[in-house]
Amino acid sequence: MDKEYAIEIDVVQGIERVMSITRVPKTPSYVKGVINLRGVVTPTIDLRERFLLEPKEMDDRTRIIIVSLEDYDVGLIVDGANDVIDLPLSAIEPQPQVVGSVASEFISGVAKVEERLFVLLELTKVLEPIKRAEVT
């Protein structure tokens, strides 16, 4: 089974099917472009590429998770979005020294629930280049 990643529910604005993405010149390769989501232009990044993981074709399971951090929204392209899971604080541990191939700076911790292991993402670090680009 592939790794499962988790983000805090309070930053999630919605989960969308893949839609038309307009490429933006002179952006990092993991920034796939922008989408027009109900009249709001939203930058969209491919988390696989951001984490330097093996590329994968988008399919029927691919989703765009819309997250809102501080004063900006970003779409995260993911292989699939499962369900909302209540992670008890007791199940969350600090990030281990090594977590596969995802850079440790992008990880805030790990949680084990039953037989599943979730890698908790530190979205402020993952999205830092996007925020810097919007400021300039």
Image (cartoon, rainbow, N blue to C red):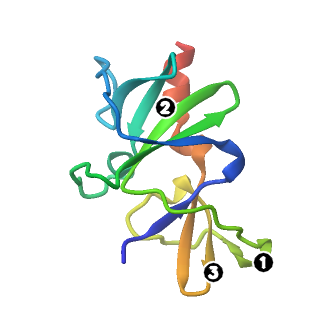
Q: Amino acid at mark 3?
A: Val
Give the alpha-carbon distance from disc 3 to disc 2, as whole Å: 32 Å
- Quarter of the image holding residue 50? top left
The single residue placed furthest to the top in the displayed view is: 136
The residue carrying mark 1 is 90
**Circle 2 is placed at which residue position?**
129
Query: In which quadrant of the rendered view does residue 45 lie?
Result: top left
**Image quarter (top left, top right, bottom left or bottom right) of the N terminus:** bottom left
The answer to whether the residues at label 1 and label 3 have Cβ atoms under 8 Å apart is no
Q: For the residues marked 1 and 2, what is the alpha-carbon distance in whole angstroms?
A: 32 Å
Q: Is residue 111 above or below residue 76?
A: below
* Residue under numbered circle 3: 113
Q: Earlier in the sequence, mark 1 or mark 2?
A: 1
Helix, strand, or loop for circle 1?
helix
Which residue is at 31% across, 28% downward? Answer: 20
Which of discs 1 and 2 lies nearer the camera? The answer is: 1
Asked if 2 appears above or below 24 in the picture, the reply is: below
Residue 7's x, y, as percent?
Answer: 60, 54
Spot occupied by residue 133 in the image (x, y as percentages of width and height): 48, 21
Cβ–Cβ under 8 Å for marks 3 and 2: no
